[in-house]
Amino acid sequence: MATTMAYQQKLAEKLLVLNDRGQGVLIRMNHIKKTCTDPKRRPSFLADKSMEGVVKYINRKFPNIDLRGSSQQLSNIQKQKSAVLEGLSSYYESFIDVMEFRDHVYDLLNTIDACQCFFNITVNFDFTKNYLDLIITYASVILMLSRIDDKKVLVGMYNCAYELSNGSSDPSYPRLGQMILEYEHPLKKLTEEFGPHTKSVTEALLSLHSVYPRRNLPAEQWRNAQLLSLLSVPATMLNPAMCDTMACEYLSMEVMERWIILGFLLCHTSLNINAASQDLWKMALRSGLYVTLIRDEVINIHKLSEEHLDGLKGYSKRLADIKECKEHTIVNCGATHREKRHFLRHALKELIKVLEDEPALLGPKVLFVFMALSFSRDEVLWLVRHAENIPKTKTPEDFADVHMAELLFYMERLQALLGRYNYVIQRYHLQYLSQFDALILNDTIQSIYVCPEEESVLMTSFVSALSALTLKQCGKEFDFKAVRMDWLRLQAYTSVGKATLPLKEYPDLAKIMNMTQFHTKMMDNVDELLNETADLSSLCFYTRVFEKMFSQSSEEVSMQRYLMAFPMVCTHFSQNTHQMCPEEVSNEQLCVTFMEEIAIQTCTVVLEISTEQCNLHEPCASDDIKTLFSLFLSMDKMHLTLTELCTSYSMCSEFTVFKHIFVPSEFLLTQLETGLSKIFIRMAHYNQTTQEIARPSELLAGIQTYVTSLYTLTRYINVDITRLVKNVLLQQTQPLDSHGAPTITTLYTNWYLESLLRQASSAFIAHCPTMHCFVNHNVENEQNFKADEYSDICEMRALAELIGPYGLKFLGENLMWHITSQVSELKKLVFENMDVLVQMKANFDKPETMQNLQKRLTGCENVLKRMTIIGVILSFRTMAQGALEEVMHRHCPFLMGSIECLKDYVCTDTDIKVALSVYELASATGLPCDIDPALVSAISNMRSDNSSNEDEYKTTCLLLVYIAVSLPTLSVDPNSFYSRERGGHQNNIHCLAAAVNHLSAAMFTVQNKNIEQHLKEFLQVASSILLQLGQNMDKTEVKNRDSVCLLLDMIVDESPFLSQDMLEDCFPYVLLRNAYREVHRAFIYTMG
C-alpha cells in the first residue's frame, strides 16, 4: 500500500517543485523585508504622515479590523483605496504564496510520514537532500516572514482597501491573518508542527554522521591526508576518483550545517535522547557563529538556539552545551578557517598546475575539481558572513584575509579549465558510462531477486540509455535529465516503508546509481554542478565586505596579479535571480567599481614609470649617485607592481555580468586616456595669471618621449597604445576633451591671442617677414617671453603637430572673431566720415580738393591701427597655415597632392560657391587660397538684417578709400621706418598688405563683386595720395615717405589679383626703386 501511495503521490516530483517554489517565496520575503526597511523604496502609504494613525490602528487591531466602527481612523484609506490596492497587491499576494506553500509542505510531509519513508544521505542521496532542503526552506520562509515588521500593516491595509472597494473582505484574509498571528514566535510554532515528523527528520539528519564529521576536519588533517593532491600517490594518478558517496564529497558544508542547526531546533527532543544527535549538533555549533537564511540574512545560531531552548524544560544541559560551543567558536573558529583557506590556496594552485600541464587528467580526476571548488566556496562564504558580523575576540585579524584574491583567482581558473576542456571530460565519461557503468548496473539489476514492474522498467531504461552511447556521439549535446529524474523517482519508490524493493537492502545499487548520476552530469550538466559547488553569487549582497576584501588585496603587492578575480566573481551574480522575484535589482555596478579601481592602479603605475623615464633624460649632477640609485630602485618597484597588475589582465579578455560585456583592457585604456590628457595639459605649464606656457616644440618633444615610454606597456599586456595615443591627441585638437576639460588647443589658442598677438597689436612685438616669425623690440621689462621662441618656423610646425587641422581651425575661428570685431569698428568710422569719403573717392586725382577734404577727415590713425591689427592677425594665421601645410605634406602626401590638384582647377570662371567649398577643404590642410574661406564666413555672419547689399558694398568701397587716403599719416610716425634686416616696418604697418588683400577679397566675395577691379581702384587712390605726399617739401612730414611707399609694392606682391603692370600704371616704378635704395642706404648707415 505504501508503494502504491508513493507511485500515486509523486513524491519525487513534489519535492522538486516545492523546493523551487519555496526558494522563490523565500527570496520574495527577503525582498519585501529589504523594501520595507529602505526609506527610498518603502511603500509610500507606510511613510505618509497622514497614514500614521491608520498604521497604528491596524497594528493594534490586526487581524480583526472593524471598518464600520472605525470609519474615522480608516478614512484616509477610503480616499485612496484604488492606489492602496494597486500598490500593495504584490505584497499581499506574496503572503498568500507563503500560506499556500505552507499548505503544500504540510500535505507532502504528512504523506511522507504516512509512507514511512527511509532517509539516508549516503544511499538515497537525492531523495534525502530534497527532503532536508524542503524542511529547511520552509523553516527559513517562516523565520523570514517573522522578520518583516510591517507584515500586519501590509496585509491589513490591503484588506481594508479591498473591503471598501468590494463590500467584503478578501476570501484569503481570515486564514492569512491567523497565520501571521501564529508565527509571532516562529520557532515555537514550527516545533509544534514538526512534532509528528521528528522521526523522519532525525533519521535524515543522523545519516550525515558518516559525511559531516569527516568533512569538518581541521586544515592540519587535510594536510596530513594530502587532500586534493593528484601527486600524493603517483601510481594512482590515472585511476578514476570514485567513492561510495560521490555527491556527498562536494556537498556544501554550509548546507549541512543549516540542516543540522535548524533541523535539530525543529525536532529538539532528539537532542536529549540521542547521543549521536548531540555530537552532530555540537559539532555544527562549533563550526561558526552564523548560517545563512537567504541572501545576506543570517542566523546567529547560538543566540537563536539559546532563546529557543531556554523556555523549555529539561534542556539546561543543552543550554550549557550552547554556551560552551559559543566560547569555543569565538576563540578557535577564526584561526581554524584561516588555516583552511591557507591550505586551499596551495592545494588549488598545485591542482591547477597539474591539470593545465595534463588536462586529460580532468577525466578521471574531475571529482577533485568539484571538491576543491566546494571547499573553497564554503570558506569564502564563511569569511564573508563572519566579516560582516565580527565577534568580540582577541584576534579580529582572523576574520580578514588579504590573500582572498588568490583563492578566488584559483576558483575562477578551475572553472575556466572545466569550460576549456569540457570535450575531454565528456569523452572520458561517455566511455565510462557505456563501458563500465552500464555493464555493472546491468549485473547489479540481474542480481536482484524481486523487482516490481515499475522499478524494473526504470532500471532497464537506465541500462538501455547508457549502453546506447558511442564515441561517435562525442561533441554532441546530451540530455540525461530524464535519467536523473527517473533515479529520483526510483529512490522515492524504494524508500517507502514495506517497499517490495527496499533500497536500503541494496546499497550496491545505490552506490552505482549515485556514481552514474555524477557521470551523467559530466556529460550535460557541468554548468549546473559548477553553480552548485562554486556559486559565489551571495557576495552580490555583501557589497561592503566584498569591497573591503578587494581593497585589502589590492594593497598587497603579491595579490595584485589576482585582482581580476573580484570582477570575475561578479559573473556569478546573475545566478541569484529567481523568476518569482524579478524586481531584485542587478548589481553590475560593483563589477564596474572593481574594474575601474584595477585600471586606475595600473594606469597610475604606468604613468609614473613614464614620468620617471622622461626625467631620466634630464642631465644629472655627478654627485647625485644616491639619488640615481634610489630612482632606479623606485623604478624597479614600479615595474614589479606593473608586472603584477598586468598579469591579472591575462586572466580573461572579456566576460559578461547581467548581459553586460566587460572588457578589462578597455577600462585600462579609458583610465590611461584620462590620465594622459591631464599629464599632457600639465606638461604645457600654462599659467593663466602670469601668461606663461611651454614652447610648442618643448611640449611636443615631451609628449613624444612620454609616448615612447608608454609603449613598454605592450610588453606586459596586449593593448593598442597607438589607438590610445591617437584618441588622446585627437581630443587635444578640440576645444574641450571628452570630460569637458580644456585642451592643449584651448591653452595655446588663449595664449597666442592674449599674449603674443595682443602685444604685437600694440607694436611691442614686430612681425618679421624675413625670419617668418615675430620678434621682440629692444624694450626692457615689456615682455616676459621671447616672441621668436614661440613663433618661428619650428614652433609653428610643432604647434601644427600638436593641435592638427582641427585645432588650427579652432584657432582660426578665434582669430576671425577678433578680426570681425575690428571690422565692426572700421565700419563705424566709415559711417562717421561717409560724406567726406564719398567726395574723396570722386576727387582723389585733384590735389587741392583732396588737401581740403583731408583736413575734414578724422580717425585716420585709428583706421590704420585697426587695419594693422587685422594684418598682424592674418600674418600669424598665414604662418600657422604654412606650418600646417608642411606637416600635412609629411604625414599624408598623397592626400595633399589630390587636394592641390583640385585647388588648381579653380579659376576665375568657377562658381563662387564651388570655389569656396574647394578653398575650405584646401585651407583645412594649410594650403594658401586666393580667398580665405574662414574670413568670408566670418564677414558674411556679420551682416545685420537691416543692412542691404548696396549699403554693405558702399561701405566696403569707402573703407578702401579711407585706408588709401590715410596712408600719408604713416610717414609722420617714426616707427614707420622699414627695416631691411626684418623685411618689415617697426610698427608692423607692412601687415597692412595682408589686411588689404585678404579683407577686400573676403568682403567683395560676400557681396559678389569683382575683387580685381576694386583693388585697382584702391591702387589708384593710394598712388595718387602718395604721389601728392612726394610734393610736400616739409621733411618732418615726409621723414618715412619712402618706407610708406613700399607698402604699395607689398600689397601688389602679396595679392593674387594685382600685378606689377597695374602698379606701374598708377605709381612709377622708378619711385619704388628710389624708395628701396633710400631705405637700404639708411640701413647701411645704421649698421655702420
Image: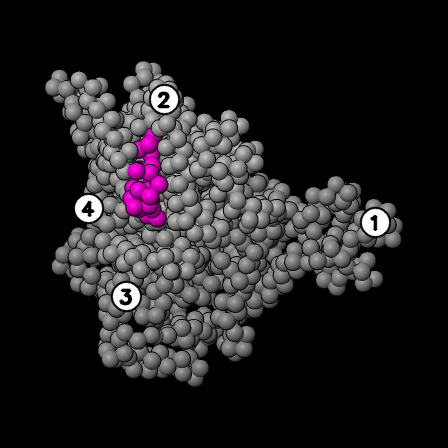
What is the distance, in whole Å, between disc 4 and disc 3 at their CAs?
32 Å
Question: What residue range appears in magenta?
Answer: 1044-1068
| x, y percent for residue 24 | 54, 59
What is the distance, in whole Å, between disc 1 and disc 4 at their CAs?
74 Å
Q: Nearer the viewer, mark 2 or mark 1?
A: 2
Q: Please give the residue where the numbered disc 1 appears in the rendered image.
A: 75
Quick check: 140 above or below 440? above
Q: Please give the residue where the numbered disc 3 appears in the rendered image.
A: 422
Quick check: 344 above or below 837? below
* 265 left or right, relative to 460: right
Q: Is residue 43 magenta?
A: no
Give the residue at the far top of this rendering: 780
Task: Identify which amino acid the numbered label 1 is placed on.
Answer: Ser
Task: Identify which amino acid the numbered label 4 is placed on.
Answer: Arg
Q: Nearer the viewer, mark 1 or mark 4?
A: 4
The disc, 2 or 1, on the residue closer to the chain's N-terminal end is: 1
Task: Identify which amino acid the numbered label 3 is placed on.
Answer: Asn
**Picture quadrant where residue 880 is located:** top left
Q: Nearer the viewer, mark 4 or mark 2?
A: 2
Asked if residue 144 can be seen in this view, the reply is no
For mark 4, does the 10 Å Cα neighbourhood hold few (<14), some (14 to 19), or many (20 or more) residues? Answer: few
Task: Identify which amino acid the numbered label 2 is placed on.
Answer: Met
Q: Please give the residue where the numbered disc 4 appears in the rendered image.
A: 715
| x, y percent for residue 564 | 32, 47
Q: Is residue 1052 magenta?
A: yes
